[in-house]
Image: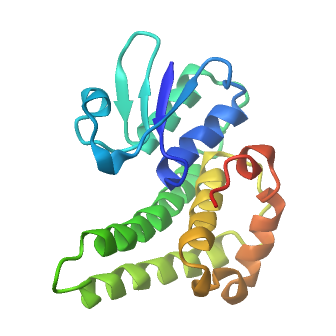
Amino acid sequence: MKLYMSPTSPFARLARVVVMEKGLEDRIEMVPVNPWDSTPEFVRVNPVSKVPALVTDEGVALTESLLVVQYLERSFPEPVLMPPDDVDAVYHKLGLGHGIADQAVAIIATGKMAGEQGVPKALVERRTEGLNRTLAALEVGLAGRAARPDIGDLAVAVGLEYLDFRFPDMNWAGRFPSLKGWYAELRERPSLARTRPG
C-alpha cells in the first residue's frame, strides 16, 4: 500500500500516526507530495489533490483522513483504536480533533490564496472563534480523563500540535490547563514524537 502525505499536513499526520500505532510501517509506503503542486501523478490518485490518499493493495485510492483511518481500523483491528464500547465518545473526539485541524488549515489556506485585497478579516475571525470554542469544549470534556489512546485522542493531539506548529502565539496550553495536562500524557508517544512537524 502507499500513503500519499505531506509532512506538515495534520490530516496526513493523523493517518501516519495510525499507521504507526497499528505497526504497519512495513506494509505501507509513505509517498511525500506537495498537494499544492497538483502533479499529474498525484492527481491520478486523488483528483482533489488533497492529502492523505491511501492506495490499497487492490489499487483502490481512498481519500480524506477520517475515511483512511477508519479503513485502517477496520482492516487491521489490532491494536484496537476504536473501542466498541466507546464508539460515540471516540467519534466525538475525532470530530473535534479534525475540527481543530480544519479551522487552522483554513486560516493558513486563506492566507496563501489571498489576493490584492488581503485576507478576509471576518473569515479569519470566524475560524479563530471556532477554534477557541472547540478548545473550550475539550477543556471541559477531557478534564480528568486518561488518554487510552484511541483514534479520537490521537486526532485531538494532532490538532493541538498543529496549533503549536502554525499558531504558537495562540498559547492554547496556557489558556486551557486541563487540556494541557491531558495532552501531556500523549505527547511523547512514539507515533506522535516521530511525526511531529517542524
91 on left or right of 150? left
Number of callouts = 0
| Residue at x-position 28% and y-position 90% | 121
Residue 82 is at least partly visible in this image: no
| Residue at x-position 44% and y-position 70% | 104
Is 87 or 154 nearer to us in this picture? 154
| Residue at x-position 41% and y-position 9% | 58
| Residue at x-position 61% and y-position 46% | 151
64 on left or right of 100? left
176 on left or right of 73? right
Q: Position of residue 168 (x, y in %)?
A: 61, 80
Is 87 or 135 nearer to us in this picture? 135
Colour mapping used in the image: rainbow
Depicted 4 relative to depicted 158: above or below: above
Which picture quadrant has residue 89? Answer: bottom right
Q: Position of residue 176 (x, y in %)?
A: 68, 84
Depicted 82 relative to depicted 155: above or below: above
Residue 16 is at least partly visible in this image: yes
Which picture quadrant has residue 147? Answer: bottom right
Q: Position of residue 87 (x, y in %)?
A: 57, 44
Quarter that holds the C terminus: bottom right
Q: Position of residue 171 (x, y in %)?
A: 64, 85
10 on left or right of 172? left
Residue closest to the far left: 116
